[in-house]
Structure formats: C-alpha cells, structure tokens
Amino acid sequence: MKRSRLLSLLLLGAGGLGAWLSSDLLPNASAADPAPKPAPAPPKEVEILNVSYDPTRELWKALDEKFAAKYAQETGTKVTVKQSHGGSSSQARAVIDGLEADVVTLATAIDTDAIAKKGLIKDGWLDRLPNHSLPYTSTVVFVVRKGNPKGVKDWRDLIKPGVEVITPNPKTSGNGYLSFFSAWGSVVLRGGSRDDAVKYVTELYKHVPVLDSGARGSTTTFAQKQIGDVQLAWENEARLELKESRGALEIIYPEISIRAEPHVAVVDGNVDRKGTRAVAEAFLKYTYTDEAQEVIAANFYRPTNEGVLKKHAADFPAIRLFNITEIAKDILDAHKQLIGDGGVFDSIYKPKS
Amino acid sequence: MANVNRRVLPGFSLTLGYTLFYLSILVLLPIIAVFLKAGSLSFPQFWAAVWTERARAAYLLTFGTSLAAAVINLLLGSLIAWVLVRYPFPGRRFIDSLVDMPLALPTAVGGLVYASLYVKTGWIGRWLEPFGIQAAYSRLGIVLVLVFVGLPFVVRTVQPVLEEFDPESEEASASLGATRWQTFSQVILPALYPALITGFALAFARSIGEYGSVVFISGNMPFKTEIAPILIVARLEEFAYGEATAIAVVLLVISFTLLVSINLLESWSRRHAS
C-alpha cells in the first residue's frame, strides 16, 4: 500500500514538473494567432519585448511604465513592455537564434548590425529614427579612489609607474573594447601616429592586473575587492558606483573620450510577423520625447535632445567626445583592426620570443 | 545460471532502445551539431582558429590546471571518503552533505567568493601575501576553484566502495604479518583502483569544461591565465560561430581521447584486481 502511494505521489510530482516546464515552451499560448486577421478594431492589449544590455535595467523600467501610461491614454490600448537584459552580444545572439524581440536597444552597433545581417532588421535602420537611432549616448570615464591619490587626470597618466588600471577584456566586453577605442583615440586624435598609439596601448595594458570578462565584473574587482587605482567605466555605471561607494570613490573626466552609441532599432522580421509594428515604433519614438529624455538624464545617460542635455549640463561635463568614425571607417572596422583576431590587442600580449 | 540470455526481468530491447534514443537526443545530437558547425569552416580557417599561439597556451592551461586539480582531488577526496566511512564522529552526517555543496552552488558564486577571499586584501589572501603567494588572478587560483568544483566526484565514487570493503580483510592481512603499509598498498588500494580512476576522470572532465567560477578568479590574462573556454566566448563576441565551435571541437576531441584512455585504464585495473 505504502509503496503504491509513494509511486502515485512521484507520478503526480513528475506530471506537475512537466506541466511547469512546458508552460514556458509556447510563449503567449493564449495570444497565439497564426494568421493575423485583416485589421479589425485595434487589440486592447499588446505585449512587446525589448531586448537590451545589462546596465539599462533601471532606465528601461522607468521608460516602459511611462510609455505604457501615455500610450493607453492616447490610443486606449494597454501595452506591456517586457524587458530582457544580458551581455549585449549574447542578447544579439539570442535574437538571431529566435528570441522574439520587437525592439532591440543594445550597447553598440556591432551587435545590432549582426542582427541586421541576418535579415531581421531592414537595411538603412540607422536612419529610420532621429539622431541616427540614438535616443541617448554615453562615454567612458575614470573612476578613482577618494582624493585621487595617484593624481590621474588624463589618459597619459594611466601609464605612470605604479598606476594599476581596471578594465574588462576587450575581447569579451563592450565596456572593454570601448575603453580600448578611447585609449587609442586619445593618442591618434591628439597628434600621435599609429605607432605611438600601439606603444601607448601596449604600455597601458601592462598596467592592467586583471581582465574581467564583463563590466560588472570589473566594478566588483575595483570597488569591492579594492584592486587597482583607476577603473575605465561607462559613465552611467560610474555614477551608480559613486552613489554606492558613499564617498570612497571619485569620477575623473579625461580630456577626451569616445562617444558610445547604443542604437535602438525595431526588429522588422519579428514585428511584422507578430503584428506589433505600430506599438514598437511608437515605443522607440517615445524615447525622444522631452519626458523620456528627462528620465534618460536622471539615469545618467546623455540625452540627445540638446535642450534637455543643456538643462543637465552640470551632470555631464562637456569633454571632447570623439566619434568612432574619427579613428576608423565605422565601429565594425575599428573592432576588426584593433580587437579582432590578429588585431592590435592580440599583439600586445604576444610573448617576446 | 548457465544461460546468460535468460534474464530475470524482461524488456531488454525496449530499455536498450530507450537508452540509445535518449543518449542520442541528449548527448550525441548536440555533439554532432558542434562538429557540423565547425565543419562549415575550410581546413585552413579551422586551423587558423584553433592553433594560434594564444590558443595553445590556453589549452595547456586548461588541461594543466584540470590535471593538477584532479590529482589534488584524488588525494583529498579519498582522504575525506576514508574519514567519512571509517570514523564515526559527531557531525559526520553534516560534513557528508557538505561534500555535495559544490554541485548545488552556482559555480560563478564559488568563483566570486574564492576570488574575494584570496585577493591581497581578502581574509586568506592577506596571510599569503607576505610569502609572495598570489592566489587570486593566478594559475593557483584556477586550481583552487577547480578543486572546489571537482571535489564531490572523487568522494562520491570512492565512498560506496569503501563502505562495501570488509574491514576483516585488513585484520586478516595484519594477522598474516603484513605491515600497515603493506596492508594499505596491497589489500586496500587495489580494491579502490577502479573507483579512484573513475572519480579522477569525472573530476578531470568536470574541470575542463568549467567556466563560471574560473573567469572570476583567473584574471583572464592572455598567455597567462586565460582558459580555453574564454577563447570560445571571445570568438562568439565577434559572432564568429564557426571559429568558436572549432575551438570547442578541439577541446572535445582532446577530452574524449583522455576519457577513453582513462576508461580503458579503469577496466584494465578492474581485471587486474580480480
């Protein structure tokens, strides 16, 4: 008797587990609508998915809510924006492999472009939204310990004897390669030759004791484990780090740094199939409104709306931000030459034989 | 007993079919997919991806640290198994369940904790620092976390064999005039060989594939502390799927060769023991 009861319990458990696992397999099973009906009254409820990179959780959460409220008011349709966050290129790969993103808001054009190359985003996507599809930009800044004991002011100070620099691996991290591009630009855009730049970055990475695989790893190494004197961080991450550190850290703005361009795009292949194009486009357009630009500034990203940026000028020191096109054809080209296989970064670590 | 074909329980063909089907879906198919993907490269492309100076350094590091960790686990693990089986002491059950913890804990957490303990300012690292030992962000750190993730395998394979092992044979050996060392090396150890080898192989294989914990403690410096799985991630970052899988294929082939030879060694030792 006892044994049969145990068996039935087990079966019940297995059944439950099976149901739970499979509940995940069919997204929106209730809304599954293979053939979209010829435009009846607009649906009362829509759900879209925004696939983004890691540090933007708080930003998009705030924007999603405000957009939903505004959209409901204007059209009577209830929108839910779902978010997915992760390393930028892993997110791009997920979309390529079939994650049904309606919009992508990734860290760099390299990742968005990889999706476009698969035909999911139509050519010319860069110019379909204002400002080259950039609702906001960011940059790479220095985080130093309180009082800046090593007196670090600019890129050239990073290679002074005794200075340790924390930056993630350019091979595996967007923060990593943008820091590398910044370092490179700081030489070639101030009169240095290519050789000078190679010499500089080679020296720079000798001052890097740890190459974490991602931006958050670097922050842990620098802020928690107290390793290194300077961290090359995203401006928005640096600001959060500063807040958390309660006075133990400071931000230093170098004279020059890169303009990081986290483009946004509607994933054409997915929205046309799901019938969510209108909402997806409205969502991205919303990010350019004054209201959204204020949210962006409050989350420490640089608004692209001149007026809003001016209002927050104190928060965003006007250092020289250079475009990637000043050091290469575009970001793909820069990545290939400097970071890619056999590029400059590889030669830095080559043991002298 | 003479007729081996007559089994007590029916259903051989059914269970075998099920086994083959299951193994194909779960193990074989993904591995074939890896090979096919890597096959999309031409041979020169494949070679260029897997045989750079940097990749060779990474393979050497991955297999070297895995081997070191597996050897340490072999010694530590057998010792722990011995203590858990032979000596009743308060808290034994508790320690027994501790052994499985590395399997349950996300290895990334393990790596992060180890890193913060062993950095210069960490609880353990600050005591090593005066001796010039840098544990975090070095090969030593990688071996440390690999010992952590591989520990349960040796303990759990050796433990049941030791439990079955009859203490009377030790007594018999002693009463026949064997020294303690002779009893250990000629009575106990031979019985344990198959289990030890299996445990070693499992711990070793587990270490080769480990990524999550290692990235946090190794520092990922090319040529020094960069393990092969990091190279795979780096290639994926460039959306170079083919090149990434090519490196995976090399890892698979080396691991498979090693595991097969370890298995052969195990069956040989089993035959030898009986």
Image (cartoon, rainbow, N blue to C red):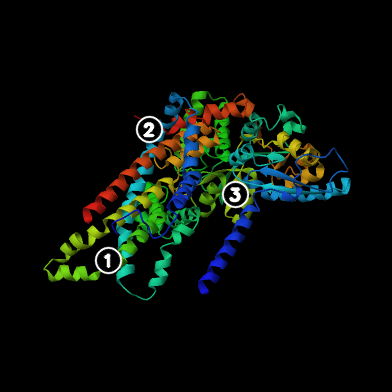
| Left or right: residue A94 compared with residue B81 | right
Identify the residue at horizontal 36%, vertical 49% (top origin). Answer: B204
- The answer to which of A2 and A331 lies nearer the viewer is A2
Mark 2 or 3 closer to N-term? 3
- The answer to which of A139 and B234 lies nearer the viewer is B234
Amino acid tagged 2: Pro
Residue B255: image quadrant is: top left
- Distance of mark 2 from mark 1, alpha carbons? 52 Å
Identify the residue at horizontal 41%, vertical 30% (top origin). Answer: B52
Residue receiving disc 1: B165
Q: Chain of mark 1?
A: B
| Left or right: residue B113 compared with residue B274 | right
Q: Chain of mark 3?
A: A
Q: Residues within 10 Å of mark 1 (few under 14, many from 20)?
A: some
Q: Residues within 10 Å of mark 3 (few under 14, many from 20)?
A: many
* Numbered label attached to residue A351: 2
**Count of numbered circles in the view:** 3
- Distance of mark 1 from mark 3, alpha carbons? 64 Å
Residue receiving disc 3: A250
